[in-house]
Amino acid sequence: MASNKLNLTRDELASFLKNHHQIRQFERLFADVEQLEPTTLDDLALSGDNAAQKAVQAIDGLEAQKQELEVTVAALEAKVNQAVGALSAINDQLSMLMQAPPPREFKRSRYGSFYDTTTQTAAAINTATAITFNTTDLSHGVSIGTTTSQVIVDTPGIYNFQTSIQLDSTVSTSEQFYLWFRVNGVDVTNSASQVRIQGNNAEIFVALNLFFDLKADDYVELMYSVSSTAVQLLASGAVSPHPGIPSVILTVANNIQGVQ
């Protein structure tokens, strides 16, 4: 079968082609050429217009992306500047904190409240005698030791010791009573007080208050001496309308100063 463009019969093709297969291949070749025939000028112009339009669209798209990118970069620069400003402020605050003294660390308060419900009498005159306690009312970190005159603390700090004592005498003569503190068995300098009792049945209320800078396991004692063993620390039971009267009351607290 001859090709329209070729205008040769298969017999004519057989004169220079060896077999039927080569003839079919030759016909197919010219059929493909027909499909690839040159494009007209109009087609070329239309294709050029389309290409130009696409190029313009591409350029416009790139310009829009450029503008969006510029906006994004500007926003990022603003955020970076804000972050730099915030970091600068933080650095200033850190510098101020490093120059300022560190905050003091306050440990939990230690305290104790103790009293004795018995009448206490010195064994001898003009002899240092320790006041004892037989009752703990409240306690945290401050306690009465095995030796019941010793008030022991478990935490370093400045402690406030406040005591009140009920004195009495059973003789009519004028007698003297001295009261002072000891810390770890050593008398505290300038801590003594003197009271003169005028006659019997002349009860006197005595109070004493001192601060002590103590270490853990330090102990404090209240000491006294008398000019007569007739002078005593008097305790009495409750009689309406008043409650019982301990011979001695002691309160201790370290809430004056915490420990750093």
Image (cartoon, rainbow, N blue to C red):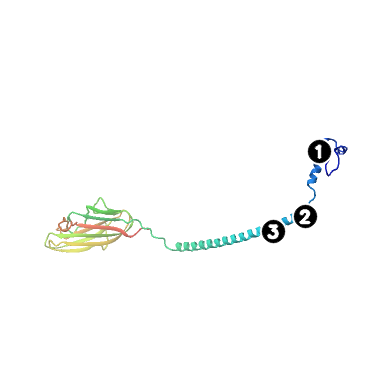
| Disc 2 and disc 3 in contact, CB within 8 angstroms | no
Neighbor class of circle 2 (other Cα within 10 Å; few <14, some 14-19, many 20+) is: few
Callout 2 secondary element:
helix
* Three-letter code for the amino acid on which mark 2 is drawn: Asp
- Left or right relative to 93: residue 126: left
Q: Which residue is mark 2?
A: 42
Do we see residue 128 in this rendering? no
Do we see residue 27 in this rendering? yes
Q: Which residue is mark 3?
A: 56
Quarter of the image with the N terminus is: top right
Q: Nearer the viewer, mark 2 or mark 3?
A: 2
Determine the CA span between mark 1 and mark 3. 47 Å
* Three-letter code for the amino acid on which mark 3 is drawn: Val
Relative to the observer, which residue lies in front, 258 or 157? 258
Neighbor class of circle 3 (other Cα within 10 Å; few <14, some 14-19, many 20+) is: few
Determine the CA span between mark 2 and mark 1. 34 Å
